[in-house]
């Protein structure tokens, strides 16, 4: 089972590229725009599709975009995520204009920490990840229940995480659930996805989807996605409610990972999960995502097609041929 991971490299972490390599902006996509004039919002941006966008000036451009959008919509945008890369090797920018407030877990106050060996593994992973994206080798093998990259340095780090995580689930769960340090929980969520599959692993990762830190939520949900893709039984153990809520978030990574996981969970046409997705505001958000022009729209298109009762074979054909509006109209 090979998957092409939809990896996002955030602007504030872009120093991992080592140097500023200007690329053009391929697509600028919005979400949370109900009741907002998108033409005005788009026109207010200090950058447009086709513009050259380099890391060196990117942070200032994003700051200017936040201010400009705030003047148009009357409040700051909830998110501006700059990602690499679309099929042409260009940046994709996702802009959230609103999001439903969510009650996150209280910030933990514990002192649990990972040992230096685990931190070093995660650092190796974090360094190799943007290299893999930059070199265009982002495909991953999920057939073992954890992600293994085709890029040798990244694959080596991931195999190291697997070796470390096996037999250390209690420590990883303790750090993920109790550490007051955000970065410790980020690393623990990533490493826990490489432990042996168990109900306690799934439960801890699902609980981490309510963490206050968006990267903890991202890592935990991605680990659950890999498990659900491999094992339909694991998918039935994942509570859908929290991930349906994430679809209404104002943060791009929440939408991305939740839509992918829910797409996997509804492959069996689970009546319970589909019923939760039929809520009006959830459907509207899925329609926003489905109309994106990037590969990140695909999961929402599957979800809408299943809500509409479209046969899976026909749905795959509609998605493959880009007939998004036909899917939406059948709702």
Image (cartoon, rainbow, N blue to C red):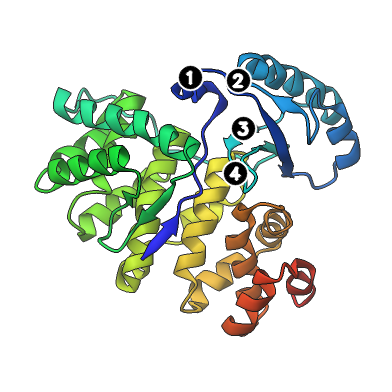
Q: Which residue is drawn at 29% across and 24% down?
A: 109
- Residue 38 located left or right of residue 253: right
Q: Which residue is drawn at 44% across and 33% down?
A: 130
Quadrant location of the N terminus in the rendered image? bottom left
- Whether residue 37 can be seen here: no
Disc sitting over residue 55 in the figure = 2
CA gap, disc 4 to disc 2? 26 Å
Quadrant location of the C terminus in the rendered image? bottom right
Q: Quadrant of residue 85?
A: top right
- Whether residue 298 can be seen here: yes
Which x, y percent locates residue 122?
27, 31
10 Å neighbourhood of mark 3: few (<14), some, or many (≥20)? Answer: many
Q: Do the residues labelled 1 and 2 touch (CB within 8 Å)?
A: yes
CA gap, disc 3 to disc 2? 10 Å
Mark 1, secondary structure of its residue: helix
Q: In which quarter of the image is residue 76?
A: top right
Which x, y percent locates residue 286?
67, 59
CA gap, disc 1 to disc 2? 8 Å
Which x, y percent locates residue 105?
41, 38
Give the residue at mark 4: 249
Disc sitting over residue 82 in the figure = 3
């Amino acid at each position: 089972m090979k998957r092409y991971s939809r990896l996002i490299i955030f602007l504030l972490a872009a120093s991992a590229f080592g140097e500023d390599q200007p690329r053009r902006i391929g697509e600028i996509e919005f979400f949370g725009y109900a009741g907002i004039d998108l033409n005005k919002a788009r026109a207010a941006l200090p950058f447009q599709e086709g513009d050259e966008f380099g890391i060196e000036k990117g942070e200032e451009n994003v700051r200017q975009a936040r201010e400009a959008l705030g003047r148009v919509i009357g409040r700051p945008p909830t998110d501006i995520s700059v990602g690499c890369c679309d099929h042409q090797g260009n940046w994709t920018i996702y802009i959230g204009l609103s999001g439903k407030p969510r009650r996150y877990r209280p910030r933990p106050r514990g002192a649990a920490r990972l040992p230096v060996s685990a931190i070093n593994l995660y650092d190796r992973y974090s360094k190799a990840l943007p290299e893999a994206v930059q070199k265009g080798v982002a495909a991953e093998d999920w057939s073992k229940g954890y992600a293994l990259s085709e890029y040798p340095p990244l694959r080596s780090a991931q195999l190291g995480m697997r070796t470390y995580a096996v037999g250390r689930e209690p420590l990883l769960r303790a750090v993920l659930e109790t550490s007051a340090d955000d970065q410790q929980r980020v690393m623990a969520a990533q490493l826990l996805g490489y432990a042996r599959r168990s109900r306690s692993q799934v439960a801890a990762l699902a609980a981490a989807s309510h963490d206050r830190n968006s990267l903890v939520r991202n890592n935990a949900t991605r680990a659950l996605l890999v498990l659900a893709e491999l094992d339909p039984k694991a998918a039935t153990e994942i509570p859908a409610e929290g991930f349906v809520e994430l679809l209404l978030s104002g943060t791009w990574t929440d939408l991305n990972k939740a839509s992918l996981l829910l797409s996997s969970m509804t492959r069996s046409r689970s009546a319970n999960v589909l019923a939760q997705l039929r809520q009006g505001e959830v459907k509207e958000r899925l329609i926003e995502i489905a109309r994106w022009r990037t590969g990140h729209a695909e999961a929402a298109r599957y979800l809408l097609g299943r809500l509409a009762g479209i046969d899976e074979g026909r749905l795959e054909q509609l998605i493959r041929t880009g007939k998004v509006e036909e899917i939406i109209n059948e709702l």
